[in-house]
């Protein structure tokens, strides 16, 4: 169990990492056995490190730190700070991607809850990250369906199924690669920090 002052520290770290992660695109380099033939190349994963930050704070700080950091992130964005992918402000709930941002809160909570149920192993941390990612996508999909049903978003600009493809299906492969990286990083850091 993580102590309360440490949880607050991890919540603050998670908030900062999520803001920075929104701005940093995720890349992967080609495997070393291709370097002699092709050289070193970076390939864009189609996502930012935002999801990675959400899941990392859950794995490192626990469920409360994860949820608090994401509540603060969403609140700051809605208060007008331009920290979301497409800006910020109170009208951001009209963006199709807003449900995914709301999903950060339960996603971080579930990831953090599961990450501390057992001693840190790569498998358990990977599974907790996958569950957090699944939670984020479920929240985003539910919000998209509600937003299109109640016309919170402009359905003529992007149809519902295209929005689902843009915000879930196209991003999922890159986000799964980020989940793998977060699980390895969290496993290593928790071993080094002895918790």
Image (cartoon, grey):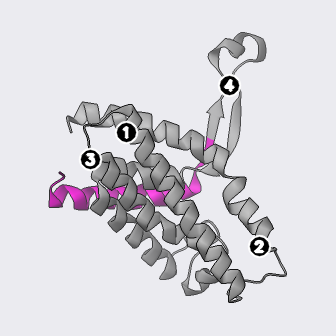
Q: Quadrant of the C terminus?
A: top left
Quote the CA–CA distance across marks 1 and 3: 9 Å
Evaluate if marks 1 and 2 touch, with contact meaning CB atoms under 8 Å apart: no
Reply above or below: 130 against 161: above
The picture places residue 44, in percent across and down from the top left corner, at 70, 41
Quote the CA–CA distance across marks 1 and 4: 27 Å
Q: Nearer the viewer, mark 1 or mark 4?
A: 1
Left of 146 or right of it: where is 78? Answer: left
Q: Secondary structure at mark 1?
A: helix
Reply above or below: 89 against 98: below
> Which residue is tagged 4?
30
Q: Residue at x 49, y 47 (%)?
A: 130
The residue segment tinted magenta is 1-26
Left of 124 or right of it: where is 102? Answer: right
Evaluate if marks 1 and 3 touch, with contact meaning CB atoms under 8 Å apart: yes
Q: Earlier in the sequence, mark 1 or mark 3?
A: 3
Front residue of 161 and 171: 161
Residue 189 colored in magenta in the image:
no
Q: Residue at x 44, y 56 (%)?
A: 54
> Which residue is tagged 3?
117
């Amino acid at each position: 169990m993580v102590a309360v002052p440490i949880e607050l520290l991890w919540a603050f770290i998670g908030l900062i990492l999520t803001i920075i992660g929104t701005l940093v695109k995720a890349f992967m380099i080609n495997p070393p056995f291709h370097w002699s033939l092709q050289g070193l190349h970076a390939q864009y994963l189609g996502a930012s490190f935002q999801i990675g930050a959400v899941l990392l704070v859950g794995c490192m700080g626990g469920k409360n730190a994860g949820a608090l950091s994401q509540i603060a992130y969403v609140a700051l964005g809605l208060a007008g700070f331009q920290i979301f992918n497409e800006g910020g402000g109170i009208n951001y709930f009209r963006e199709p991607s807003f449900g995914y941002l709301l999903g950060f809160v339960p996603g971080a909570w579930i990831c953090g809850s599961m990450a501390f149920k057992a001693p840190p192993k790569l498998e358990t941390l990977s599974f907790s990250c996958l569950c957090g990612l699944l939670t984020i996508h479920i929240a985003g999909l539910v919000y998209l369906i509600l937003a299109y049903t109640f016309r919170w978003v402009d359905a003529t600009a992007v149809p519902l199924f295209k929005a689902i493809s843009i915000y879930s299906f196209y991003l999922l492969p890159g986000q799964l690669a980020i989940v793998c990286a977060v699980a390895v990083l969290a496993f290593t850091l928790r071993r080094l920090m002895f918790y």
